[in-house]
Amino acid sequence: MQRRPSIPFAVAVTALVLLLAVGMAAWRYQPLRQVGEVTTGPDALAATVPEFEEAGATILNYVDGDYVTYAVTLRNSGPVGVRVTGLPLPDAGERRLLQPVAVGLSTGGSDDAAGVEPLTPFRLGAGEQRTVVVQARFDHCEYYTERAIDVIDSQTVQFRVAGIPRTATLQLVRPLLVRSPTIQGCDARTLDRSEHRRTDP
């Protein structure tokens, strides 16, 4: 005669199944969105072009070696709170015309890139939003030909939900574009176009 499982054993199995289900849901859960305009700080020469493709674009004027800031607002569009732990920067080996070098929080919680304080992990409750600021440097123009365009259309965000670490790539509502300068605007560029390869060591 087969013995029926005891009640405590059945409860333990049910609890384990529920725990696994919650863990899987948390692992898949991604409520973060980028909302509103990507704004630039007063140090940037920028122009918004609404007619560029579908969503428009913000075009930054490349000035070799200069630093600019731009602000991205993150929103938790889900019903469960999350904790944002960081915004990883792209590898310097990617050699972007606009190379992000640091991230922080907008001073006083404002929605612009006029001030920045060190980025520390912060919580976003359901429906809450917070502005983060990216500092970037115009660089690597020698690896681009004239009239080439570098596009920043996404932002990687690291966060935790129910204690589980997640990474999400958020699409920007309106991308940032940087056009490669002419040879007069890039001291490191030569007239030999074969040298302008981003895969160079």
Image (cartoon, grey):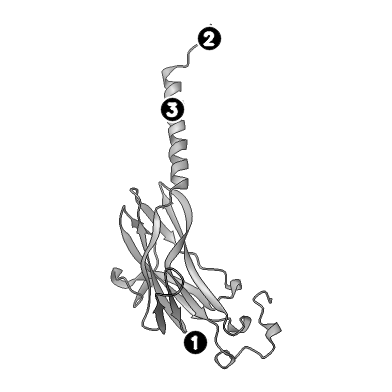
Where in the figure is residue 89, as x and y percent of width and height? Answer: 51, 68
Question: Which amino acid lies under the numbered mark 3 shown in the image of this protein?
Answer: Thr
Question: Which amino acid lies under the numbered mark 2 shown in the image of this protein?
Answer: Gln
Please say if the residues under marks 2 and 3 sit with CB atoms less than 8 Å apart.
Answer: no
> For the C terminus, which image quadrant?
bottom right
Q: Residue at x 50, y 79 (%)?
A: 178
Name the residue that disc number 2 marks: 2
Please determine whether, in this image, residue 147 is positioned above or below residue 32: below
Name the residue that disc number 1 marks: 63
Q: Residue at x 31, y 70 (%)?
A: 111
Where in the figure is residue 102, as x and y percent of width and height? Answer: 46, 72
Please say if the residues under marks 2 and 1 sit with CB atoms less than 8 Å apart.
Answer: no
Please determine whether, in this image, residue 62 is positioned above or below residue 9: below
Q: CA distance from mark 3 to mark 1?
A: 61 Å
Secondary structure type for disc 1? loop
Where in the figure is residue 187, as x and y percent of width and height? Answer: 59, 91
Secondary structure type for disc 2? loop
Name the residue that disc number 3 marks: 14
Q: Earlier in the sequence, mark 3 or mark 1?
A: 3
Q: Earlier in the sequence, mark 2 or mark 3?
A: 2
Which quadrant of the figure has residue 32?
bottom left
Q: Residue at x 45, y 63 (%)?
A: 171
